[in-house]
Amino acid sequence: MVLKDILAISGESGLFKFIAQGKNAIIVEHIETGKRSSAFSSAKVSSLEDISVFTEKEDLSLGKVFDKIYEKESGGP
């Protein structure tokens, strides 16, 4: 699962797809609505690839968590 182009932006609801790098901002597209907007350098932007989940034994990247869910559910919804 490729998560580096999926972004969470503080103060904004939902997830965004990275489109392009601008001079003072990045251009993003809301995944649900398809609406494009700018995320300026003052906004806290996190790639889902950089997010980890704390567990009892270790920290797991979000991608590994999704992979484990996929395996447990046998690829189903």
Image (tube, helix red, strand yellow):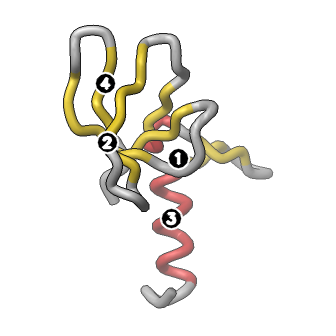
Give the labeled residue for mark 2.
36
Mark 3 or mark 1, earlier in chain = 1
Q: What percent of the width, then of the height, locates residue 21?
A: 22, 23
What's the residue type where badge 2 is placed? Arg
Q: Is residue 42 toward the left or the right of residue 57 in the image?
A: left
Say which element carries label 4: strand
Classed neighbour count for the residue bearing mark 3: other residues with Cα under 10 Å, few (<14), some (14–19), many (≥20): few
Task: Give me the disc on residue 61.
Answer: 1
Say which element carries label 3: helix
Say which element carries label 2: strand
**Which quarter shows the N terminus?**
bottom left
Q: What separation in Å lies between label 4 and label 1 (alpha carbons)?
A: 24 Å
Mark 2 or mark 4, earlier in chain = 4
Q: Residue sitting at 43 percent across and 40 percent down?
A: 7
Q: What separation in Å lies between label 1 and label 2 (alpha carbons)?
A: 28 Å
Mark 2 or 3, which is nearer the eye? 2
Task: Decide: is 77 above or below 42.
Answer: below
Mark 3 or mark 4, earlier in chain = 4
What's the residue type where badge 4 is placed? Ile
Q: Residue sitting at 23 percent across and 38 percent down?
A: 19
Give the labeled residue for mark 3.
66
Q: What percent of the width, then of the height, locates residue 47?
A: 44, 36
Give the labeled residue for mark 4.
26
Q: Quadrant of residue 54?
A: top right
Mark 1 or mark 2, earlier in chain = 2
Q: Residue sitting at 31 percent across and 9 percent down?
A: 24
